Amino acid sequence: MILAIPGSLRRSSINAAALRAAATAAARDGLAVTIDDSPRSLPHFNPDLEPFPPEAVRRFRQVCADAGGLLLAVPEYTFDIPGAFKNALDWTVGSGSLYRKPIAVLHVARAGRGEHVREALSHVLRAHNAHVTHHHVPITQRAREANGEIIDTRIVEQLRTVVAQLVQRASVSQPGFVEAQELAMATTVQPLSGTYELDPHHSTVQFAVRHQQVSTFRASFADIDASLCADGETITVQGQARVESLTIAEPPEFREHVVRSADFFDADMYPVIVFGSTRVELGDDGAATITGELTIRGTTHTITAKGTYQPTREDPFGNNRAGLELRTVVDRRSWNLNWQLPLPDGTDALGWDVEITAQLELIKKG
Ligand SMILES: Cc1cc2nc3c(=O)[nH]c(=O)nc-3n(C[C@H](O)[C@H](O)[C@H](O)COP(=O)(O)O)c2cc1C
């Protein structure tokens, strides 16, 4: 059993809603996630009470000790762990109930928020000798129904994967843990293995660059291809995008000036952008780091892209799909994309930094 503990006591807590959605999604895989609201009812921690802890504390310690893993979702309050949740953690210190416990911490705040609570939880849980992974699953109000429940299917899938990975870790650290659950997982969630080809209709490769200092210009490549080969320990990713397929129709001069012109992509001379990985790291927490050679305009440089992966799962049509979402920022001058004009105030019309993002759906072929 996985114990899910919300760090917020608020009635319409987004953290508690995330745990409920994770429990519901996991139940579909036959995985048991029990929500525990103990922080709400525990007395204030007092070391004087340690020899004869109150009943609520004894129960809380026991359910933590019995759980195969813990799933936590904790908001940030004034740059730290909320008091009620920290109080609950303090009660477990002397008990050893979190010792070597696999713990997954969900961070539901948008990027750039809640960094302090993440760090604080890392420190505290490390002091318990727990095995902690962090998972950023940003959830906005838009992802929730009027009743507060999370309905966004993409977020629900992410939560489902977090639980599946936590169960896997729990079963490794405690042999015999949830054998029935492992069986259920084996049919639905597998790590990446074998060869995969891109589903180009549900994949995007895009770049974004600061334009005229007022906005960000984005464009995608319509004609893309990629493959992934996971052969035992080694994983390789190859990809390419045809420059002419840049999804910009108007004005027509754009195609001449940006796509074909030697100031930019010089598409007639260099029609394809190519990527080949040299190192692929996939973490237990769903993090992906891919280093490789990116060739644009006949020039090759090493880049590192970071993001997430989704393990293989079956779609309704019998295909097995995996996902990769990656981001990197490069200086376009490295590939001789040197075009520039000064604005009247002396600043640059077009940014040097270019963000490249890829959302790739990969279908298992063998
Ligand atoms: C007392 C208080 C302090 C907060 N301090 C921070 C903060 O330091 N950093 C932050 O990112 N958000 C802060 N917030 C915002 C909460 O983290 C945010 O509203 C979160 O969604 C609350 O979680 P819940 O919906 O699960 O209750 C604070 C909220 C409250 C009530």
Image (tube, helix red, strand yellow):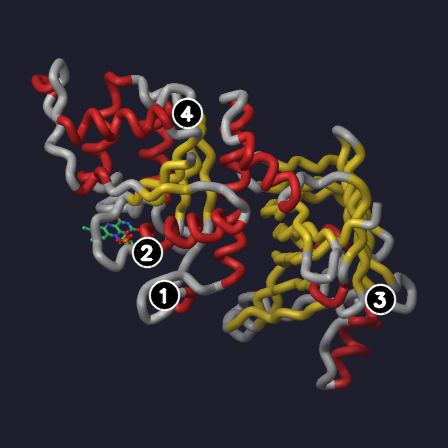
Foreground residue among 324 and 189: 189
Query: Circle 1 sits on which residue?
Result: 141
Figure quadrant of the C terminus: top right
Does residue 275 appear in this view?
A: no
Label whose residue precedes the other's in the sequence (1 or 4): 4
Label whose residue precedes the other's in the sequence (3 or 1): 1
Residue at 51% over, 22% down: 173
| Mark 4 vs mark 3: in front | 4
Asked if 21 appears above or below 1 in the picture, the reply is below
Foreground residue among 343 and 7: 7
Helix, strand or loop status at disc 4: loop
Q: Identity of the amino acid at label 3?
A: Asp
Determine whether, in the image, residue 159 is placed left or right of residue 192.
left
Q: Position of residue 178 (x, y in %)?
A: 51, 31
Q: Position of residue 311 (x, y in %)?
A: 64, 45
Query: Circle 2 sits on which residue?
Result: 14
The crowd level at tag 4 (other Cα within 10 Å; few <14, some 14-19, many 20+) is: many
Q: Disc 1 vs disc 2: Cβ atoms closer than 8 Å? A: yes
Asked if 19 appears above or below 350 in the picture, the reply is above
